């Protein structure tokens, strides 16, 4: 209950109660929380105090307001920093979710003009295509579609099959951690908001035209491209963040 003798403001005490209800699981993700009037009656405070508490909870991304409907427990977002590369497993498990990876497909194809330029190989050279589905608590969150020069791709393919047999979560970036020959020096990435097409929607189990964040990556060892990857993150689950310095 709230204490008027406590040095902590009533609205902050109420925000903490809201947080406890969510963390304990009494208020489930996606469910509507009590209205302002109901909370005011329950805790014997003014609606202004309730409004301040809910505002704090909203800023903490615990709840979200839906115009005309009410306030709901917010979905957990997987936050990934941009200033460093983190493994898929550690990124997902930060939310207490169980990470898993499914090897969707591996194939050997011949490079077209675009892929030959990106990977710095000859047109019609063999390349390896590896497709992975990353999930949290068995719910798909990201689809990876990677292309490698054939020799490296064969090694990553063997690694992917081994990790799958061991039932360990991974992405292709995990291969490089233990590689001596193929040790990346940097990654070039672009980010764009898109909507899902039929193929990606089917893989991620979402409706067509759902919001996605597409990340296109080229992994380099010095000047040599090692991997070209397109990653499709579910827009309602993933968010990326970066700390940028001001140069004055």
Image: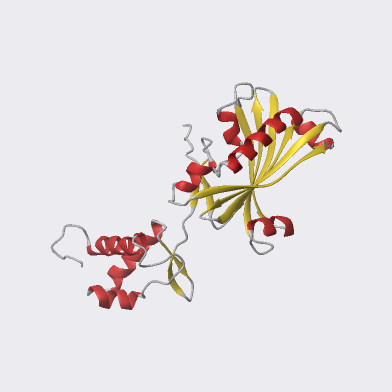
The residue lying toward the viewer, choosing from 210 and 89, is 89
User: Which residue is rendered at x = 69% and y = 29% of the image?
Assistant: 226
Q: In the rendered image, which quarter is residue 17 located in?
A: bottom left
**Looking at the image, what colour scheme do you see?**
secondary structure
Res. 186 image quadrant:
top right
Q: Is residue 242 above or below residue 149?
A: below
Q: Which residue appears farthest toward the left when viewing the image?
A: 5
Relative side of 200 to 10, left or right: right
* Quadrant assignment, res 110: top right
205 and 188: which is toward the camera: 205
Q: Residue at x 32, y 78 (%)?
A: 37
Q: Residue at x 63, y 21 (%)?
A: 181
Residue found at the very far front of the displayed protein: 165
Which residue does the image show at 63% across and 35% down from the upper left?
A: 159
Residue 208, percent from left and from top? 69, 63
**Residue 134 in the image, given as x and y percentages of width and height:** 59, 49
Instruction: State the quadrant of the N terminus.
Output: bottom left
Q: Would residue 81 appear left or right of 38 to someone viewing this image?
A: right
| Closer to the camera in the image, 65 or 29 | 29
Q: Residue 223 at x, y = what percent?
A: 68, 23
118 displayed left or right of 170 = right
Vertical position of residue 21 compared to residue 164: above or below: below
How many marks the image carries: the answer is 0
The one of 219 and 245 positioned closer to us in this rendering = 219
Residue 176, x across and y down, in percent: 59, 30
Height in image: 171 above or below 178? below
């Amino acid at each position: 209950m709230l204490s008027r003798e406590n040095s902590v403001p009533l609205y902050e005490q109420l925000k903490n109660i809201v947080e406890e209800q969510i963390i304990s699981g009494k208020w489930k993700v996606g469910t509507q929380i009590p209205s302002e009037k109901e909370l005011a009656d329950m805790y014997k405070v003014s609606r202004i105090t309730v409004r301040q508490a809910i505002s704090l909870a909203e800023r903490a991304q615990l709840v979200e307001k839906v115009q005309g409907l009410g306030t709901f427990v917010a979905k957990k977002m997987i936050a990934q920093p941009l200033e460093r590369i983190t493994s898929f497993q550690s990124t997902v498990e930060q939310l207490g979710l169980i990470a898993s990876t499914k090897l969707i497909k591996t194939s050997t194809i011949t490079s077209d003009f675009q892929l030959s330029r990106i990977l710095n190989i000859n047109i019609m050279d063999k390349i390896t295509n590896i497709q992975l589905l990353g999930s949290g608590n068995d719910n798909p969150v990201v689809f990876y579609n990677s292309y490698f020069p054939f020799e490296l791709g064969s090694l990553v393919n063997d690694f992917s099959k081994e990790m799958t047999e061991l039932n360990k979560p991974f992405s292709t970036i995990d291969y490089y951690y233990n590689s001596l020959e193929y040790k990346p020096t940097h990654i070039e990435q672009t980010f764009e908001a898109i909507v899902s097409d039929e193929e990606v929607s089917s893989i991620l189990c979402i409706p067509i035209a759902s919001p996605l964040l597409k990340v296109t990556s080229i992994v380099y060892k010095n000047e040599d491209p090692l991997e070209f990857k397109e990653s499709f993150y579910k827009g309602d689950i993933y968010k990326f963040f970066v700390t940028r310095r001001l140069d004055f």
